[in-house]
Structure formats: structure tokens, C-alpha cells
């Protein structure tokens, strides 16, 4: 860009200009860039560095530019490299000399740090809201299906019966941790860097706290070199997002499983399914699959940013320009995925007969039999071995446990008595009443707590 | 392992046994596994699930096993798969029937979750201490070199003069954020999972809060399915570690640069350097390079764990076994790197003449001239352009700015006067007195605050 | 290490020594290090740089050291940093002065490059053999189950019927590409770097081609700076391994699915399954899950090595030392995973009745109906729409397609006639006889070709 | 999209439609999609599946659509999901019934596989050309600076003198390996998947070889399930690109170093440098930094795609849709980076006096002295120790080696004689005449070979 190439003899190579220009993606920062400039100009005037009249001209000019951008009438130019220079050039064109004073006591290095922090703060708030929406959808779905029994899985094998609501609330917990991580990230992002200059601070009597207050920041940065070279908040957002997408990939993986012909646990609403170009019968859980697939790009952006920052000397380097596209795409991907899954969960239905039948199949109550023996005085490790052999025997006879005659039970342990037939899916569920367990009582309690949390945002 | 293969007809394939055994690395969890078992046994006795005598036998047996392990006399066996089964088998051998009761109201799924959380809590505390040590080393080094002036860099080009102490304190800030992130991670790790059973909770009247108190946990987990399938705390540690290693890679990168013949800013003590097998004169900053290189493995472990967890259905799956080696290596790498860099910083010396000469070279005070013109009434953008051309002129005449006659200054702007020659490295530093800037006054303040923080741990 | 610290005044710090020593892991390179030294010594003698007697002493000494290492009687010492210095020190101790000449015309920089290339070449060959074994297991399994029909899946939904053998051969193809990639990687690894010295070549009349021939290399490296700073072959191995593990993760994912109670397609042999510590009935596909999980660490090692190499100035830097552990673990993981899966596949059995019943369920033949209409003159896109509506109608009536009366067919298109009932799983399979399709004829052909390939190694 | 939702009762949710639509990025595949459809239509006609007239209508229609797209007059619609359906819908609108027949014997699953392979083949060819251009720029730069001597570095410390041309040719070698990797990748990408149908092959008498020949493919795919679920070629391109970007990051890292005030080895042309918004004197190596930074995103895309594919069951899943944006961006980034670096290298100049002076500084000839002693009969390891002590002595006396009196040399070894002063930068370079070394003779040879390679494309 000409006006900052005073010492250069030659213009930038065209290809180089295109390669280095960030305006094709950083235009998106315009509301933050303008808000920052307004606060900066007001501060400069308050401190007597520019006149009140100059500040007024600047603020009005910026306001008009913002309207123009929002009306789609502003032409972003690659020759002006980035959003800062595009806006500054337009401002100077509009208000003349006053515009040339806006960059007093400021560098693009602290300006972009400010813009990125403002953007990230908004992104975090939006993300937290979308997390809450999905939590709400999960709780509603759990309440709607309060009595649905399904097999609990470990190693994707039937393990012990659980309530579907209990299973859904496991995701509520994951999202709750995600919410907390984003809240902590917000705390660390909420630091105002303007006033750090290029890297060394500024030789003007500026008031950084005023700017922070104007822009609703909690604190100002403590070290000017760090302030312009720090992108921890970008990495932290992306790391939180990666973990959250991982949770969503587990949920959507389960939905694709549950929607198979083989499981048949769930029915995805037509509005969240797609057809095939060749197979007329197909109904594909496209949204769930894509959400799972998009985990990849979020992991990728995290890897990218960690790579960018590795071994960079202080302070600002152009490599930092690579922070933007990855962050923008991470934010867009995460929020849209949370929202679309909320929508899908809100329309998801279950087949309680199928899930109960699945839970009833096989030897899912074997642990209950071992616990039965423990209550009758057997040591757990021995009880486990006895029931292991009993299951093996029943499997060979191709009988479910509750069809096995008592005498055969007793061949494995004399402790078995007629009350062994009282062991059932329901008794199993009721029994697991330890804090956080799957008993109806525990699940009701958990639903009440969850309701409180999501009501309380 | 035989005693949990009751229902199997055939033993595990040998290669399969080796492939799945975790004891070659999870033996390291023994102190946590034993502490957890002791607390569990005490709870079982308090709740009347086992007798006090059985609990006593168990606790004494575990205590003897621990001593044996620490004396190097315990034989870990691959046939017993993992640390839990190795210890349980040894316990049963020692105390018989009572030992067979220890696994009452417990599954390996919640047991390993407990062990991993105990390990991670300790690892975080150790990490935070090592961070504080490095912060201390940085502050001492800054204080020792309080007056050293060096060129501040952006784009690895001389930008503006800064105090070395200010530059070092930028790393203090990064580590301060790392400290905060680990503290938040500790908070989320500090959740007691035992009592979740295999996945569904337990059909015994257990007291999870008692176990939590015994093991110094703040809270118990809320959902049993989540509790056994959650490894967020592993990912979060690894993500925090990746960011911290990134900071260290920037620091060590700078040290390798500063130690070059070309920069010559710093002298690495012999004790932190290595020689060459072929070049007798070589003195290599081996420690700094390796620390930078080890960033790779920490990033790699984070990628690995995110990959492992992607799209895993609930609840426990064997894939989770892959959480351990990566976490162990991350912890070891991060702590040893923090410690070795502390040692290196404590013995690092600077060459103030060299750094000052470097700062004096070239046109590093150009911004000060622009600010000079602003103070004389020029708009900043115009001042920037004027000085840009002035620098270009001086460079063509091959003269430093302070050797340029006033008349030539004035050819670029009539605002230049004799006081332009008062612009110096020192005046530049003094002027950058905005909060967080590099002025001696600001740096002194920052050092005082830093001292307070590191004193206050 | 003392003997290369001639210019240092102080010994290395103990912690620094431990931090930088690579002997804890690079001892594993001893056969390659010794083979390289033997070839180097023979070359030095041939060129008259050392005497034949010196070469004899060196070679015999190295041979004794190798035996000692293999007998477990060699003490590796951290003070000697790495495998090279450990062996050189032992050699000098044994053969005196001659040993002090071995490092003539050599640097550790080209020596380690040689060792790593020798190791990698062997690793690639072993990997390719393990790939062939798994291909053999797949072909045998396909042949054994030649007639098994199962539903083919897209989006994990039933799509069209396929032969299980066809499905298994898809994995054969993936492994065939892996095989090719490793072969290409071998080609690029097969370059002899010794003779590059520290980075600049050597001032001795050496014969690099002789060394290459002795060590069975195809070529020598062309540029000494590149030769000592290149680790492309490590990255390429890791990238090939990542892709191969990805394939294995798809296969093991399918096995865990097929082994669920819900699918019930397959039966994993007891020897490749594990039990539960709490649930007596459990039989977990532990091996398949772990193999899937180990994808994470292989991806992680690739990320790590790419990170290590990023932005490293030429030539050798200590960061390169980080190439070893990741590569070793990648090789071990990939080969053991290929082998264990071969074993598991060799003992896997299928339930043809279950898979056929699954294929028969639902509307899997809908595409065949559309193709039926096309053969009767309908445009495909219209035929697709007609059958889409027909399926919707049948689903509402809760009838399979072959139970729907002809009159109802004809309500959707007059082109339907009595021969529509001839559409069956078998007719569908037979019809898909395009090259590479699932028809029995195509699959037989593919099996013949596969047999030829795996016979031909 | 309505026409493939025959069996659905409800339209897709709007947000879901937006979430799943790929047209915003896959429109870019239009030339490949159209070329594939033309070849397919011609084949259908040849085989008598459609009439010649229908084929003619289809081909003409597609041709018009292509022109419309290229003229910017084609409206891509999100409701038609993807590029295939957008084009098919437009075709049907144009040519009616014939258009409804184009999708005979084809699925979007094999169609997109075809489009992606065509795109990737073109991308590889373009990439290989850009690699050749950069190799040309490097060779020209090396020839232009044939006699420039600089210090060779290991550990970023002066190691031994080298010719700049030799250093630049190290990058030539890296790019040569990249070229080979892309060539191998092209080989594996060059496989025609059309004719695989949805996953099971097709029930039509199609001629896949004809389609392959029409589209210039070498081979057809062997297994229909593999053909539609394979994205190895995407991963392989991205892995090759990651390695190539790693090489470029090393080169650009060196350029940023060499362009520092401290090194001063090189001068970046104004056309490839940028200024600062605040510091008028700044000239930043922006292009080099950005190229280095862009390594991150390419690594990220590789991580992303490996993550996407992990543990996906066969055959096609919607996750595969995530292959596109990452690949597109990888291709664009790699090619533009190669090209911009070519431009930068073509305008780069060196300061031979500075680089020679740097090489002359310090004790860079110490290895030459050790080799000198070896030639006089000393064992290398002893010679290394002697010179180590000599260097230490000279450093204490603060003297360069060639200013040290002979008598002091001889205090360390009686083998030193007056000819020790003949050791010079030039003698050192000349001596390193082993194959691939830095001697002028070797470098001339290497330049000749390089010229031949780049001439031969």
C-alpha cells in the first residue's frame, strides 16, 4: 500500500500483493475495527492528543463507513492490504486531515490484536449460547423419553441396562464442561491490548483504561511485547472447540448407529435426512454424518495454529496473519453444528419397544446375578467367576438366564434361590441408585439439576 | 487374565495378550491405584459391605504391595493385563478371601478413571511449580540485566529499542497465562469418578463423598456413563501443555538466534551446551534446540488423543487405554523442559555492548522522529510518510539519522528543528511510558508486580 | 561427553546431560551403527586412509561389541550421549589407537543419517511383509465365505446387497495401495548419506559408492548439506503408516459393529476377545478396539515430526534427534497391528443366515426396481422418482416389496409386469457384473487376481 | 433436493439444507463434472443404453452449461445440494427427457470420486510445474552467485565454510524428492472409478475402459466398494504438500534470518517486502514470513482429512464431503507459495563481502586443522581433542587461529608446522571434494546435473 511504503522505491509485485493481502477474509472484522477506532479517537481527544472536533469528524466518518459496509456499498480493495488500511483510507478520503491523525499512538500490531479479541469475545458468547440450546434439547428429549430403557454399552457390547435419559444426560455433562472451558477462555480473552503500539508501548499520554471501559474489557494487557505477539486466545478457543466437536462426534456417531436397520433405536426426522441419487429407498442421516466429519476441520485448524506459532521469535511476525481464516471457520463450524444438532435432537424420536427388547436380549443382567451372590455372602471376585461359568452354560443351552431352571443355577452355587428370578431390567435399574447412577430416582434428580442449570443462563 | 475370563473357553492368543496388556506402562499408576483401593475398602467397611477386619487385611496387604513395588521387588505380569489386576492378584495371594471382596461395588472402568484423575492432579500441581520456577528465573535474569538495551524486533527486523528486561517479561506473561490455564484444568480434573461402576452406577449403598474426601477431591462426578467415558481432562492437560511448549519454543528459538555469531547477544553457559564429534570449535545450544524440537511430540500427543476420542460411542471402549503413554510423556516432557530452561536461564549471560550497538544501528528511531513531528503538529499518517522518505534519503547517503545535517531534515519537513538530535535510544525508551510499555519506569513497576506473583505461590 | 568437549571448561549440567542424551532410545540402532562403521572402516583401509591392520582391529572389535550387546552384557552409558559415542568409546577401550581413527572422514551428522536410513529400510521391508500377510488373511476369509450375502452399506444404511467377499476385497485394494506407497518410500529411503561429513563433504579421498554397495544401497546422496538435514524419509514412512492405520481403523470399526448384538454378523474368536472385571457375560472385541485406538498415536507421530521440521534452518539441528522415538513407535505399532489383525481375521467367523436376513430386510432392492423400469424404457431419473414413491407406499402399508400386489405396482407405473417378482437378492448380485462389481463372476475374477498378487511377493 | 426425495414426506429443514449443501465450494469441480458426464453419455450411446440422439442432446446441453458457467451466467442453487445436481437439473431444463437419462448406470458416489480424481490429477501436474519453476529459480540464483562463500551452519552456529550455491542446491534436492512424491501420487490417482455405481457395480453392459480412455486415465478401479469410499489420493496429495511446505518453511526461515540486520547476507527486493503502519523505516520480509506461516494450514488440512477418514465404515458416508475445501485450499496454497517464492528468489541478491566476512570470523576452520593433523599421522579422535584445546586457548587469547604463533600451535602438538597457515577458507572448500561436497568442482558438477533435470521437464 502506497501510504506506508514511504521508504520503498518500487511498488509491491502484483502476485506478492495478492499473496499478502488479508482483506479477502479480514473484512469480516470491520465492526470490531470501527468500534476500536471510535474508542481510540475519543480517548485521543480526551487526552488532548487530537481536538474534540477531529474526534467528532473521525467518529462520524467511521459511522458512515460502517453503514456503507453494511449496505454492501463499500468497495474493499486489495491494494490497501487489510481491513485497517481500507477503513483508514476511506476515512481520510471522507474527512481529510483529521483522518490522517487516527493512527496516532497506535500500530496495526495492537489494532489487529484488539480486533481479534473483540471478535473472539463475541464468538465465545455466541458459542456458549449455542451450547445451552443443545443442552436444552437434550434435557427435553430426556424428559420426553423418561421411561425408555435401553442396553447400556461398553465396547459396543451390551453391558448393563440403562435409562435412555441417563445416557442423554452424559452428553449434558460433556457440554457442561465445554461451557466452563469457554467461560475460562473468555476470561483470558477479555484483555485490552490497544496502547501497546508496534511492540514497545507509546510515547503519548494515553488512557488505556478508558479505551478498555468503552469497549467493555475487564483488564488491559501488562506487557506491550507480549500483547502484540500473543495469540493464545485463538489457540484456546480452537482447543475448546476441538473438544466440543469431539463430544458432538460421539453423539452423532451414536445417532448414525441407532438409526441403522440393525439397531433401529431411533427415527431421524425427514427434515434432517437426505436421499440418494440412485437408490430410491435411501434415507441418510446426512446431518449427523457431516457433523461427525466436520470434527476433522476443527482439529485441523488447531493443528494449524499451533504450527504457525511454533518457534516464532517475538514480537509480531506476518505468520500471525494466518490466525484468522482458521478461527473464523472454527467458530462458524462449531456454532452451526451445535445449532443443527439441537434441531435434529428436537425432532428425534425413539422406539421404546425396540430399545427395551434389545436390553432384554442376551445376558445383560449377569452383573446383577453376581451382585445377588455378593448379597448372599459370596466374595465379588468369586461371584463374578461363578456367573461367568453360568452364562457360558446358559449360552451353550441357548437359554436366557430367566429360563434356566433353578437346579441348574444351584449347580454353580448353592446360594442361588427362587428369588433369583426377581432379577429383571427394572430391578437392575432401580438398584443402581448410587449417586450419579441410572436408577429412575437418580435420573429424576439429575434432570431437575439440569433444568436449573439451563434455566439459569 | 484367567479370573475374569469365566465365560471363555479358550485363553487369549499370546500376541493378543501382549498387544492388549497395558502393564508395561500403567504400572506407573500404582500409588494412585493403591490409594484409591484403600479409600474404597475403608468406605466398604464403613457402609457395612465388608467387615472392618476385611478392610484392615486389605489395607495392610496393599501397603505391603506398595512397599514391595517401591523396593523394586514386585513382579508385574503381562498375563494380568493391567495395574489393577496385578495388584488385585497379589492382594488375593496375600490376604486370600478378603482380597476377593475388594472389587465389590467397583469396575475397572471407574477405577482407571480414578487413577488417571489422581495422576493428572499431581501432574498439574508439579507443572504449575515448574512454571513458577521458570518465571522466577526470568525475573531474576531481567533484574540482573535491568539496564540492558536491545533492538526490539518485529518481522525479525529492528523495530524500536526495548529493554531486555521488558522482552523477558513478555515470557513471564505467557507463563502466567499457562499457569492460569493449568489451574482451570485442575479444577475440572478434581472430580471423583469412583462409584460409577462399569457405566450404570452401583447396586450397593456406597458413600462416594467419603471416598472423595479421603482422596482430597472437591467433588464427585454427576453421571456414571459420562464418568467412565470422559477423558476431557487428559485432552485439556495436553492442550495446555501444547500452548506452554509453544511459548517455550519461542523462547528457545530466540536463544538459538541470540547465541549465533551474527547476533552475539547472549552467551550460553558451557554446562548447557554440547560439542561436535567432528568440529572441535563447536559449541551448540543443544538444550535450547531440543526443547524447541520437543514441541513436536507434545503437539503430536494432543493430536493423538483427539483422534482416539473422535466418534467413540459411549461408554468405555478399549481405545481409551491409549490415553496413558501420551499423557505420561507429555507431563515428563513439559516438566523437564520447564526445569532445564530454568537452569539455562539462570546461567545465561548477555553482552550489553553488543545489544546496545545493535539497537544503535540502522534507523530504529524512525518512529520517534514521526512522533516528534506529531508533537510539532503534523498528522501521524503524514509524519510517517515524511520520515519514510527521510530514511530512504539517509540510506542512500549511507548516513545514520543523527549524522544527517539539519538542513537535509528540513528539506523533508520545516517542522524539524535542532532538538531533533535529542532523539536517542534513551529518550525513545523513556518516552514509551504508556502502561505496559518499555520505559524504565514501566519495567520497574512490572518487575515489582512479577516479584509479588512469584513470591505469592 | 568428555572426549568431544575439548574446548569446554565445564562439564555438562547433569540434568542437561540427561535431557540431551539419546542413548535410552537410540541404542536400538546398534546393528545399523555397527554395520555402517564396518563398511566405513573397510573403505578407509581400501583408500589407504587407515591401514588394513587397523581396519581388521576395528571390525573385530565392533563384532565383539555387537555380540556383547546381543548377549545383554553391554552397558550403555548416558554420559556417552548416544549410540555412536557409546560404541566408539567401547571400541577405543578394546582396540586402542585404531579405534581413535574410526571417526576419520565421518561426522555424527552423516552417521546418524545412515543409521536411520538403514533402520527405515528394514522397517519398510518388514511392514510390506506384514501387509502381505493381512492381504492373505483377507483373501482366505473371502474364499472361505465366498457365498455369503450381506447388505452393502452407504451412510451405514442398507444400500444394495453385496457379497461379503467383495466387501473384504475392498480392504485388499486399500492394502495394495499401502504396499505401493511403502515401495515408493523404500525407493526414496534407499540413498546412502555417509561421506557428507558434518555438512560440507570431506577432505579425504573416500569411496562413497563402495560403502553404498557394502550396505546394499542403490544410490549415494547428491548434496552433503541436504544429506545431513533431510528427514523426509521419516515423514514419508509416518505418512504412509498413518494412511495404512486409517484403513485398519475402518476395518476394525466394522468388526466392532458386526460383532454387536444388533448386527450379529460376525463372531470374534475367544482368543482375540477379553472379559470384564465386573460384568461376567462380557466378551469384548478388545483387539479390534485397540487397533482402532492406536490410529491416534500414529497420526500423532506424523504431526510431531512435521512440527519438528517446520522452519528449521539448514543443516543439522538437535531438533532432529526427535525423529527417533516417534518413528520407532510408529513402526512397532503398525507392524504389530497388521499382524494381530491378520491373526484375528484368520479366526473370524460369519453368520451367513444373519447377514442374508439383514440383506433381505427393508427395501434394499429398490435400485433394482428402478433399473427394471429403465430396461422397460423409463428414463432413470423418472424411474428413481417412481420407485421412491412406491417404497414410501409400501412402507406405509408395512409390506416388503415382494409382497406388494402387482396392481399396486402398476398404480405407480404401467411398465411394471409380473416379472418384477423375479427381482431378488441373487438377481441383484448377478446383475452387477460391470468390471469391479459385486457379481459372483466379478468377485471370482478378483479373487484370482488377488491370489496371484499375494502369491507373487 | 426434491427429485431425489421421492420417499420423503417433508422437505429438508432450511438450516439442514444449508449445512449439508456443498455447492458453495464444489461448484469449482464443474469442468471435471461436465467432462465426466460427456464421456459417460458417449459410452451409454455406444453401448446402446441411450440413443445417439440422446447422447448428442446431452453433450450439447452440457457444453452450453459449461459456457454459461464460464461466462458467470449460471446460477448455482443451494436447493440442488451439489455440483452434480445443479448441472443435472439445468440439463433437464434444457434438453428434457434425454437429460433424465444421463444418470443411468451412475451414482453420485462414483461421480464425485471421478470429479475429485480429475481435479487432483490436474492439481498434481500444476504443482509439479511450479516445483520445476522454483528449482529453476534456485539454480539461476546459484549460478549467479557461484563464487559466494558463506559460513555453513549446524545448530545455527558456524560449522564449516560452504559455497552459497551448494547451500541453495540442498533445496533443489528437497524439491526433487517432492517432485518424485507427486509423480508417484499422480500414478495412484490415475484410476478411473466411474462404473462403480453406488457401491456394488452396475447392472448395465457398460464399457469402463472406454470412459477411462476418453478421460485420459491409465486404469480403471478394481473394486466398486473401495472405489466409492477411497480418498487416499486426497490424503496423499496433502501429505506430499505438507512435506513440500515444510521444505519451503525452512527456506523462508533462512531468508528471514539472512535478511536481518545481524546477518545481512541478503537483500530482499522491494517488490517482495512490505512496510509498517507505524515505523517508517521498516522493510519486512512479509512474503517469506507468510509462506512460512502457511505451513500451518497445510499441516492442518492433512490432520483434518486423516481425522475425517478415521474409523469410517464402508462404503460412502457424508463425512467424505469434507475432503473438498481442505484439498482445494492445500492446492491453492502450495502452488501460490511455490510461485511467489520463485519470484522472490529471482529478485534476491546477496552481499558476498558480508557472507565471506562471516565465514572468516571465529574458528570455522578448526575441523580443517584436525584433518591437517590426521594427514600428519594423528588419529582423528586425538586430533579433534588437540584442536579443541587449541581453540579454547586461542579464544582465551582472543586471537584468530591464523594469528596464533607457530610455537603456540606446537605446544598442543609437535605435528604442527609452518604449512598450517596455508589452511584457509579457499583451501577448506577445495578440499571438500568428496562426491556431493562443497568444493567448487563438486558444485559445478551438481549445477550441470541440475540444469539437465530442469531442462528435461
Image: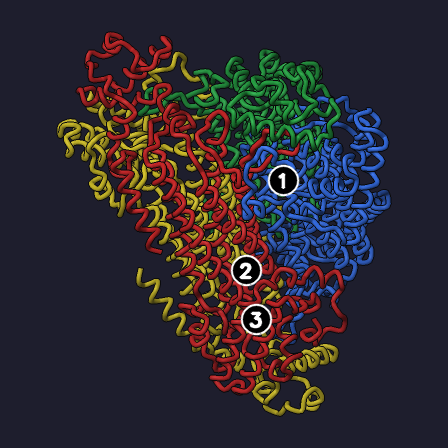
Chain colours: A red, B yellow, C green, D blue
Is residue C203 in view from this perspective?
A: no
| Above-or-below relation of D56 to B218 | above
Which residue does the numbered mark 3 point to in the structure image? B151
**Image quadrant of residue D200?**
top right
| Above-or-below relation of A82 to A90 | above
Please give the chain letter of the residue carrying mark 3.
B
**Image quadrant of residue C362?**
top right
Task: Tell me residue A315's x, y (percent).
Answer: 55, 65
Please give the chain letter of the residue carrying mark 2.
B
Along the viewing direction, whichever of A389 and D433 lies nearer the viewer: A389
Please report whichever mark, 3 or 2, sits nearer to the chain's N-terminal start.
Answer: 3
> Do badges 1 and 2 share one subunit?
no
Which residue does the numbered mark 2 point to in the structure image? B254
Q: Residue at 67% of width from left, 48% of height from top?
A: D77
Task: Tell me residue A29's x, y (percent).
Answer: 57, 64
Mark sitting on residue D2: 1
Q: Quadrant of the N terminus of chain A?
A: bottom right
Badge 1: residue crowd in 10 Å (few <14, some 14–19, many ≥20):
some
* Distance Cα–Cα, label 3 vs label 1: 65 Å
Is residue D174 in view from this perspective?
A: yes
Please give the chain letter of the residue carrying mark 1.
D
Amino acid at each position: 500500500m502506497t501510504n506506508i511504503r514511504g521508504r520503498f522505491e518500487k511498488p509491491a509485485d502484483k502476485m506478492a500483493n495478492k499473496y499478502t493481502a488479508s482483506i479477502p477474509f479480514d473484512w469480516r472484522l470491520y465492526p470490531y475495527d470501527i468500534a476500536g477506532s471510535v474508542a481510540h479517537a475519543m480517548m485521543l481527544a480526551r487526552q488532548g492528543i487530537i481536538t474534540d472536533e477531529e474526534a467528532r469528524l473521525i467518529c462520524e466518518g467511521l459511522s458512515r463507513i460502517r453503514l456503507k459496509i453494511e449496505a454492501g456499498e463499500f468497495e474493499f480493495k486489495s491494494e490497501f492490504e487489510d481491513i485497517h488500511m481500507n477503513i483508514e483510507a476511506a476515512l481520510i478520503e471522507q474527512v481529510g486531515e483529521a483522518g490522517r491523525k487516527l493512527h496516532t499512538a497506535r500500530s496495526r500490531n495492537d489494532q489487529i490484536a484488539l480486533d481479534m479479541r473483540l471478535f473472539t469475545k463475541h464468538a465465545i458468547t455466541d458459542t456458549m449460547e449455542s451450547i445451552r440450546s443443545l443442552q436444552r434439547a437434550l434435557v427435553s428429549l430426556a424428559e420426553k423419553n423418561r421411561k425408555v430403557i435401553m442396553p447400556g454399552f461398553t465396547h459396543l457390547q451390551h453391558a448393563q441396562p440403562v435409562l435412555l435419559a441417563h445416557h442423554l444426560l452424559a452428553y449434558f455433562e460433556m457440554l457442561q464442561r465445554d461451557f466452563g472451558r469457554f467461560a475460562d477462555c473468555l476470561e483470558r480473552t477479555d484483555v485490552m491490548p490497544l496502547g501497546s503500539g508496534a511492540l514497545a508501548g507509546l510515547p503519548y499520554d494515553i488512557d488505556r483504561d478508558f479505551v478498555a471501559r468503552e469497549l467493555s474489557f475487564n483488564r488491559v494487557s501488562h506487557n506491550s511485547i507480549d500483547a502484540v505477539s500473543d495469540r493464545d486466545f485463538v489457540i484456546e478457543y480452537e482447543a475448546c472447540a476441538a473438544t466440543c466437536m469431539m463430544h458432538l462426534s460421539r453423539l452423532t456417531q451414536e445417532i448414525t448407529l441407532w438409526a441403522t436397520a440393525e439397531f433401529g433405536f431411533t427415527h431421524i426426522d425427514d427434515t434432517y435426512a437426505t436421499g440418494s441419487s440412485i437408490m430410491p429407498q435411501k434415507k441418510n442421516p446426512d446431518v449427523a454424518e457431516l457433523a461427525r466429519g466436520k470434527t476433522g476441520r476443527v482439529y485441523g485448524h488447531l493443528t494449524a495454529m499451533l504450527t504457525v506459532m511454533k518457534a516464532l521469535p517475538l514480537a509480531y511476525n506476518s505468520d500471525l496473519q494466518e490466525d484468522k481464516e482458521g478461527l473464523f471457520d472454527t467458530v462458524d463450524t462449531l456454532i452451526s453444528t451445535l445449532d443443527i444438532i439441537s434441531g435434529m435432537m428436537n425432532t428425534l424420536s425413539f422406539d421404546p419397544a425396540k430399545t427395551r427388547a434389545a436390553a432384554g436380549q442376551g445376558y445383560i443382567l449377569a452383573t446383577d446375578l453376581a451382585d445377588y451372590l455378593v448379597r448372599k455372602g459370596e466374595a465379588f471376585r468369586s461371584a463374578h467367576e461363578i456367573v461367568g461359568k453360568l452364562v457360558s452354560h446358559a449360552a451353550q443351552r441357548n437359554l436366557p438366564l430367566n429360563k434356566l431352571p433353578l437346579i441348574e443355577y444351584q449347580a454353580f452355587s448353592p446360594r442361588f434361590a427362587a428369588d433369583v428370578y426377581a432379577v429383571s431390567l427394572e430391578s437392575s435399574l432401580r438398584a443402581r441408585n448410587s449417586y450419579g447412577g441410572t436408577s429412575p430416582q437418580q435420573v429424576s434428580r439429575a434432570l431437575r439439576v439440569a433444568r436449573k442449570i439451563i434455566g439459569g443462563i
